[in-house]
Amino acid sequence: MTKKEESKEILNIEKDLEELILKLDDKETENIVKEFYKSVAKFNNYSFNNIWLLTTQAKQRGINLSYVASFKEWSQMEVMVNKGRKALNIFAPKQNYEIKRDEENKPILIDGKYQYVLDENNQKIKTSVSFLLVPVFDATQTNALETGKIKTLTYRNQDETISSEMLNDLYKEVQDKYNIKIEEKKLEPSLGGYYQKNKNLIVINNHNLKSTNSKVGTLFHELGHHLLHGQDNYKDIHLDTGQKEGERESVSYIISKFLDIEQKSELYLKSWDRNAINMKEHLERIVRASKEIFHMVDFRGIFEKELQRQELTKVYLDTLIEDKSVSIKSEHNLSLQA
């Protein structure tokens, strides 16, 4: 892939955003942005450009993204890419090194290979980093799921809300990592909660109509408020209320998706700046805030604790059933003896 072709991909991203700006009032635009947010939840260690590339390519081909790897990486996992599947392209970094040059400043080659300048530790001297487009394949384009090389692990049934214990774990983790107070308080049913900057406090509505899932959405909406619009380094960013709400709700939507929770999120896209550069800045800010949460909050530890609780509950229930069965059998035997 040449530099010209790489630049073309970046220009395509800019073009995509420019086209979205013209259609902010369309429902389809919100669907496209939400698809992008779903990809952020799945590929939160990827760059903005790579997440956008994966999302748009997957949409064009009807691929439900799950996990991507190169052909070589899949082969090392003893996974085969299905015949005829077209690769997805993402950017990968390539480290460049200082090349030895002759008196005419021409690169020195031996047997067709560049010779590099070495430092005092006999290591090549790093210079710049360039980015190349490389092919990857999603798990759905391979036999990884069929062969069990990749397994889907869930911590709850899809139609169930998260447990109150897991919600409390999320509260504690956010409190500890961000040094922010979290309280539950009964508010009007229409309210989710609020953030008080002067008290460094997040309040979550504990009205009996509020589910644990909705409380999770509120928690990360208000944490988004704290990260995006409640810090000193953001005080000079002048955004209207609708746009701020859209950014906060976007963060909540991404984290909820990661937790496999469906939220009826209003992204307020109609209030966003009708400018492609500004739109990319908004999206990048949302992605940065979400990535910080993924980095700071120990979701893996929370998942593991929840799975352990479920296993203990299952063992407890199995024991109860077994004890009850023994008890019934004993009563039956006694009645026969009588």
Image: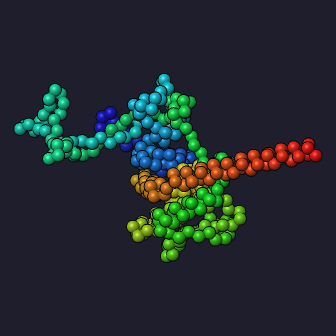
**Side of 5 relative to 67 (left or right):** left
Q: Position of residue 124 (x, y in %)?
A: 19, 42
Farthest residue in the right direction?
A: 338
Farthest-out residue, top: 83
**Is residue 96 visible from the viewing direction of this image?**
yes
Q: Is residue 330 left or right of residue 16?
A: right
x, y percent for residue 74: 44, 32
Depth check, front residue: 76 or 142? 76
Q: Picture coordinates of residue 177 (x, y %)?
A: 47, 63
* Image quadrant occupied by the N terminus: top left
Instruction: Identify the residue shown where x is 71% and y is 65%.
Output: 208
Q: How many marks?
A: 0
- Which residue: 64% across, 67% down? 205
Q: Residue at x 24, y 46 (%)?
A: 128
Left or right, 243 with reference to 193: left
Residue depicted at 57% across the width and 54% down the height: 305
Instruction: State whether residue 24 is above or below residue 106.
Output: below
User: Where residue 285 sits in the image (x, y, percent)?
Assistant: 43, 57
- Left/right placement of residue 149 relative to residue 188 reads left
